[in-house]
Image: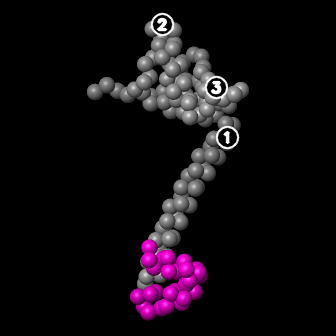
Amino acid sequence: MEEEHRYTAHAAPAAKGWQLRVEGIDGSAHARSLAAARAQVRGFLASLPGDRAIAASDGEIDLVLDLGGLDVEARASRRAARRAAEDLEAASRRTREIARALRARGLSVTDTAAVLGVSQARASQLLHS
């Protein structure tokens, strides 16, 4: 089995888009958007002169954003948002379990809502989801 090639391309904001530099390759490419960056890198590698042309169609392009530290902050923000969504899902699951346990002990929907600190409508939703 042939080994898959990986290329690391650094993307930095430039006039009307992004400047793309591939590690270990002289020259650069330009993309209007990050969505187009990987395709532009592939085209750049394929267009190198003579025998330097690289068929990168099957390889992976790792895109590294160079945003003066804001790229690091953006990644941290995405991780925090993922963790918050996971925590919210776990809390919702636990709240549904508690709502059902309270009803199983004979509490009314109104009293279950009061214990959980939610509206009566929300308590009803929890019990039926």
Disc 3: CA contacts within 10 A as few (<14), some (14-19) or many (>=20): many
- Alpha carbon distance from label 2 to label 3: 23 Å
Residue 101: give x, y in percent of width and height.
Answer: 43, 84
The residue under label 1 is 69
Distance from the alpha carbon under mark 2 to that under mark 1: 37 Å
Q: Could one spot residue 3 in this view of the protein?
A: yes
Q: Earlier in the sequence, mark 2 or mark 3?
A: 3
Q: CA distance from mark 1 to mark 3?
A: 17 Å
Provide the residue span drawn in magenta. Answer: 102-129
> Where in the figure is residue 122, as x and y percent of width and height?
54, 77
What amino acid type is highlighted by mark number 2?
Gly
The residue furthest right is 15
Name the residue: 64% across, 46% down.
Answer: 73
Q: Give the structural element (helix, strand or loop) at label 2.
A: helix
Is residue 46 magenta-colored?
A: no
The quarter of the displayed image where residue 36 is located: top right
Q: Which label sits in the foreground, 1 or 3? A: 3
Q: Nearer the viewer, residue 121 or 70?
A: 121
How is the rendered protein coloured?
one colour
Position of 101 compared to 78: left or right? left
Tell me the residue at 43%/19% (across/down): 55
Circle 2 residues within 10 Å: few <14, some 14–19, many ≥20: few
Q: Label 3 sits on what residue type?
A: Gln
Q: From the image, which quarter does the N terminus lie in?
A: top left
Q: Which mark is residue 50?
A: 2
